[in-house]
Amino acid sequence: MGNKSFYDLDYIIEINEQRLEQYINAQQKNTERFTTLFVIYSALCIFLVPIIQTLFLTKEQCHWSYYCSFYTFCILFIISIVNSVLLLSPEIREILLAPDVYYKNIKQFYETEGFPPAQADTIIKGSYIVELEGAVSKNRLQVHRKISFYKRAFHFAIISCIPYLHCIWMQISIEKKVILKKDSFNNLSSFTKTNHICGRENQNSKRSTITWSKR
């Protein structure tokens, strides 16, 4: 801080303006934060369509844990999406008065009232500091609220991966069973065709033997 003092109004104005700028820049980074969430959401949606098809659009009887995991995932995923929407939702920002209000209107008012320039300058700076502090306070609350939305969205998205991984495991198991059923059915049908062909060949050989014996 050096020789700067909090009794110096100019220094108070400076630190409040700097902090206000920091909060505004922090709010503009909400899009960058959502990029991380978007990557997670994209990964979670890869197997979502086949999972829904297996659970609700086929006649396959699924285990009860598959349904429980899917519904748990949906709840956590929706909570994360809602917080992401709140993260990106615009908020009303505190807009400061135009500078000429202070160095024209207010200064002229105190000059007409007979205040000395030094005293009028102190009063005007005090009014500007009050406005800055109000803007800093409101922007600070908005930044903390946006950060809390991001944290909740991120945490619920990560937690939803647990039931989602179980759904993927169940989906892979079901697909393996379907493949095994198809293979066994194909093997059985090929075995039946082979037996049928062998039976015909045996019958034909018997007929030819009987014909030769008659001759």
Image (spheres, rainbow, N blue to C red):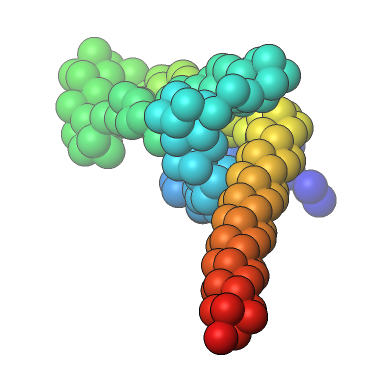
Can the viewer see residue 148 in this picture? no
Return the residue nearer the eye: 66 or 28.
66
x and y percentages locating residue 69 in the rendered image: 67, 22
x and y percentages locating residue 112 in the rendered image: 19, 19
Which residue is painted at 36% across and 30% down in the image? 89
Return the residue nearer the eye: 117 or 72.
72
Question: From the image, which quarter does the C terminus lie in?
Answer: bottom right
Return the residue nearer the eye: 57 or 200.
200
Up-down relation of residue 33 to residue 194 (above or below):
above
Which residue is painted at 51% across and 34% down in the image? 54
x and y percentages locating residue 185 in the rendered image: 61, 50
Quarter of image, res 206: bottom right
User: Does residue 144 appear to the left or right of 109 in the view shown?
Assistant: right
Up-down relation of residue 131 to residue 44 (above or below):
above
How many marks on residues? Answer: 0
Which residue is painted at 56% across and 72% down in the image? 207
Point out the residue furthest to the front here: 215
Quarter of image, res 189: bottom right
User: Does residue 137 appear to the left or right of 69 in the view shown?
Assistant: left
x and y percentages locating residue 122 in the rendered image: 47, 26
Can the viewer see residue 3 in this picture? yes
